[in-house]
Amino acid sequence: MGTSALPNAQPYFRPHRKSRMRLPVPVWALSIIGLILYIQFAIIPRFLSEPSQNELRLSRFQLDRLDAGLQRCADFNTPPLQYEFPVPSSRTNPRWNPKTGQNKTIVLRNATLFDGESFIDAVDIRFSKGAVISVSPTSTESLSLADIIDLEGKYVTPGLVDMHSHHLVDAWPHIRPSDDTNEMNPATGPLTPFVRALDSMKTSDLATAIIASGGITSSLILPGSANVMGGEGFLVKNAPLSGPNGEEVVEEILLEHGIPQNDRRRYMKMACGENPKRVYDHTRMGNAWVFRHHMERARELVEKQDSWCLSAAVARESGDRNAIEALMTSVNGEKVGLPEELELDSSTAILRGKIGVNIHCYEPEDFEDMLLHSKEFGFRIQAFHHALSAWKVPELIKESGE
């Protein structure tokens, strides 16, 4: 239908809108907007992520502990110090001091030397600052700055070393208050690898001078044989009051006095068979079980330590803060960090080859059992002591490779 059919209809026209003019945004408004955006996206996130002083201290503390743990990891894998042999003539004696030590060269002239293998006639042996510096054919040379002692052919030998002694820990004359040889206590039982002969030594022991007079210049002082694991032993020079102040100080009679602590050798005293069997009323089966159970705990700790050391080395190298925090932060009240137990320190050191194992042993089955244990847990036996029946099984001992 067209529009003409609707007489009242009006034609429709769209009203025309007036165009609006866009005014430019003032500069000051842009500046405010820019400032707001800068604060929101640059300043505030930085402020929120900036660690506090306490957080920085905590981070530094964790990093220091991590580094200390990594140093312990390095110590775990450092083999015991190896001494040069034959001994170089240029060596020095770390125990020497200018106050009580030898200050003048001494020459033992015209001696007959037995060096442990053969006899050597007519030699001069020269000492300086507590060390042998030369052995040479006897001469008539006059040495104005040396004390010359003419032995007229008398015998000279190296000092003897007693590899199993209890003097200093069981001082003479023997009385109960001064006997600290065995740690026998129901609280600790037959496994005391964590005790040390060092903590029982008495430099006032009168036996030391008598022992030295027989030519025994050095002794390995061991705990007694009441326990399956008796504790760590220490090598001493039988020369008390030898320090610069002439005092009764245990550190100054140690053979390795003057050598850094971490470079000193360590020795473990163990026993099998009759002695711990009698003291603790165990059978040999019982002795073997308590030892194997203890060493399994030590082996598990070694595995945990090795795992931590690897993870810590990776975290330190990458600088991964979250990984470092996870390695060093306590969880549920439990200590986190390098896994260590003071009770197992000596036992884990045995498994790592850091301690020489010395065993007081008796019967053939005792030797065989201890060799089986050494293979099971991977440690090396350094020596059997008091080996009453070793003559019955020499091939077993030799074939063990120990």
Image (tube, rainbow, N blue to C red):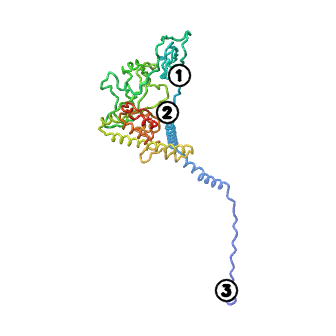
Q: CA distance from mark 3 to mark 2?
A: 116 Å
Q: Nearer the viewer, residue 382 or 111?
A: 111
Q: Earlier in the sequence, mark 3 or mark 1?
A: 3
Position of residue 272 measured from the top left corner of the image (x, y, whole percent): 36, 36
Badge 3 amino acid: Ala
Q: Which mark is residue 80?
A: 2
The residue to which callout 1 is attached is 92
Judge from the rendering whether residue 224 lies leftward or rightward of residue 104; answer left or right: left
Q: Which mark is residue 9?
A: 3
Element type at mark 2? loop
- Check disc 1: other Cα within 10 Å, few if <14, some if 14-19, many if 20+: some
- Image quadrant of residue 179? top left
Position of residue 36 measured from the top left corner of the image (x, y, whole percent): 60, 53
The quadrant of the image that shows the C terminus is top left
Judge from the rendering whether residue 88 lies leftward or rightward of residue 24; answer left or right: left
Residue lying at 36% horizontally and 40% vertically, measured from the top left: 288
Position of residue 121 measured from the top left corner of the image (x, y, whole percent): 51, 15
Element type at mark 1? loop
Q: Nearer the viewer, residue 31 or 306?
A: 306
Q: Can you say whether 12 is above or below 278 in the image? A: below
Badge 2 amino acid: Pro
Badge 1 amino acid: Thr
